[in-house]
Image (spheres, rainbow, N blue to C red):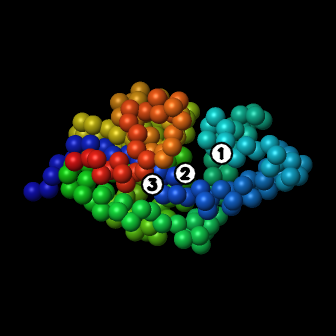
Amino acid sequence: MSTPFHTLLALDFDETLAPTYQFSVPAWDDFLAQWLVTHQIYGSEAEARQNMASFSNPYGCSPTFIAHQFGKNKAFIESFYQAVSPLILIANIAGGLKVHPQLKSELLRLQAAGYYPVIISQGHRDFILPILPHLELADIFSPLQVVDRAHKRLEPHGYQLAKALTAHLNLTHFIICDDNAPNFPHAKAEGYTTVLIHPAPTPEARAQADDHSPSLTDYLGTLA
């Protein structure tokens, strides 16, 4: 008889589960600069690069930052993600993206112990789902275990959606592992225990989390 699941183990994707930024950011920034000129936000790519703030803004999402600056709606943000996702997929595969060699074995161990893994990410499904087979994780995370574009810093929908997708499992505990502490207030409001995954967090970031670990694999190793 299989072990019943008791805990939702939610994992952020970029920089928590997989070190994607090394490959995603250059492709992302190149396309975003072009996008902002095409959509007449800026007059040149050089001007766009000076003002687009990349991921270094309160939203952790450059299109969201631009949308708020210029009064654009959510469709402006989502259309960019739809357009850029195939490009960052190519960049990560070409760059040889890999996860920690012990990650899969830890996830399999925890599944057998009653933890139900899901991904909650600001990334787009057109990037996350195709990269999972490349990382040999497609058998861990089915499409129903991937919650994308949750706008985690702006609204609690992603955390609510993960609970709704797993309501039939009658889970009693909820954990979110993420490298960005500003995502935690909404997660905590939905009853999640928050775990900051970062090798050297600031004291302010650490104070926002219930727990901290330098890497996801290290944290998973503490769970029984």
**What residue is pinned by disc 2?**
123
Q: Which mark, residue 207?
A: none
- Residue farthest to the top, as pictured: 189
Marks 2 and 3, the one that precedes in the sequence: 3
Q: Name the residue at 30% across, 63% down.
A: 105
Callout 2, which amino acid? Gly
How far separated are the C-alphas under marks 2 and 3? Answer: 12 Å
Query: Distance of mark 2 from mark 1, alpha carbons?
Result: 13 Å
Please rate how many residues cluster around mark 1, counting C-alpha atoms within 10 Å: few if below 14, some from 14 to 19, many from 20.
some
Reading the image, the residue beneath label 3 is: 17
The quarter in which the N terminus is drawn is bottom left
Residue annotated with mark 1: 55
Q: Can residue 119 be seen?
A: no
For mark 1, give the secondary structure: loop
Q: Secondary structure at mark 3?
A: loop
Q: Position of residue 129 (x, y in %)?
A: 47, 61
Rendered residue at 29%/40% (across/down): 167
